[in-house]
Image: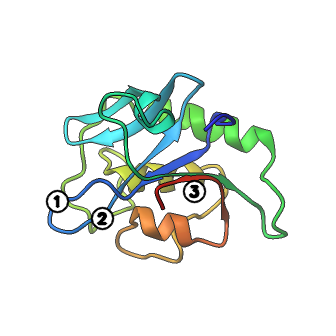
Amino acid sequence: MTREARGDILITKDQKLIWRHGHAGVVYNDSYVVEALWEGVDYIYIGKWKWPDYPGAYNTVKAMYVVDKNGNKAEQKYYTWAGSNAGYHVGKPYNKTIVNMYRTDQFYCSQLVWRVWKDSGYDVSNNSVAFVTPADIAQDNNTRTWYSRGL
């Protein structure tokens, strides 16, 4: 993976709790991804997404970009906003009640990704209404894959 840019979406199928629901994050810069983890929203070093030999690396990774209604990559200002907005949420707690994707005081992983892009003017939820999963984001008409490992 070499092209990641602020605002890009990263998805893995590696995470599971009861079912293999996956995990998602938003690229903040060339070194960090903003992720909503059990401990809360934080900056996480990009190594486990980027390099297969990195300790704790994900076996499956999909890197995605967001497109407009015509299929063109969204303007850079929206990527910048999505990445910056993700950073704004660092420090907020994990949302353990996944059936409310609209709250903004706490987040689960794919809810965070959806929210920062929704606030940028792009809905990447695949028409979800109660909760959004990494698979919903991957299947949305507004996302395109530019890198895939193990999927």
> What's the CA distance linking mark 1 and mark 3?
26 Å
| Nearest to viewer (mark 2 / mark 3) | 2
Label 1 amino acid? Leu
> What's the CA distance linking mark 2 and mark 3?
21 Å
The residue under the point 55% across, 72% down is 139
Q: Which quadrant of the figure has residue 132?
A: bottom left
Crowd rating for badge 3 (residues with CA inside 10 Å; few <14, some 14–19, many 20+): some
Callout 1: helix, strand or loop?
loop
Callout 3: helix, strand or loop?
helix
What residue is shown with label 2?
21
* Apparent side of residue 20 relative to residue 138 in the rendered image (left or right): left
Circles 1 and 2 in contact, beta carbons < 8 Å: yes
Dot label at residue 131: none
Above or below 41: residue 107:
below
Q: Residue 143: image x %, image y %? A: 64, 62
What residue is shown with label 1?
17
1 or 3: tag closer to the N-terminus? 1
> What's the CA distance linking mark 1 and mark 2?
8 Å
Q: Which quadrant of the figure has residue 79?
A: top right
2 or 3: tag closer to the N-terminus? 2
The residue under the point 30% across, 34% down is 56
The residue under the point 59% across, 71% down is 140
The residue under the point 64% across, 36% down is 4
* Apparent side of residue 43 relative to residue 122 in the rendered image (left or right): left
Label 2 amino acid? His
Q: Residue 27: image x %, image y %? A: 55, 36
Label 3 amino acid? Lys
What residue is shown with label 3?
118
| Nearest to viewer (mark 1 / mark 3) | 1
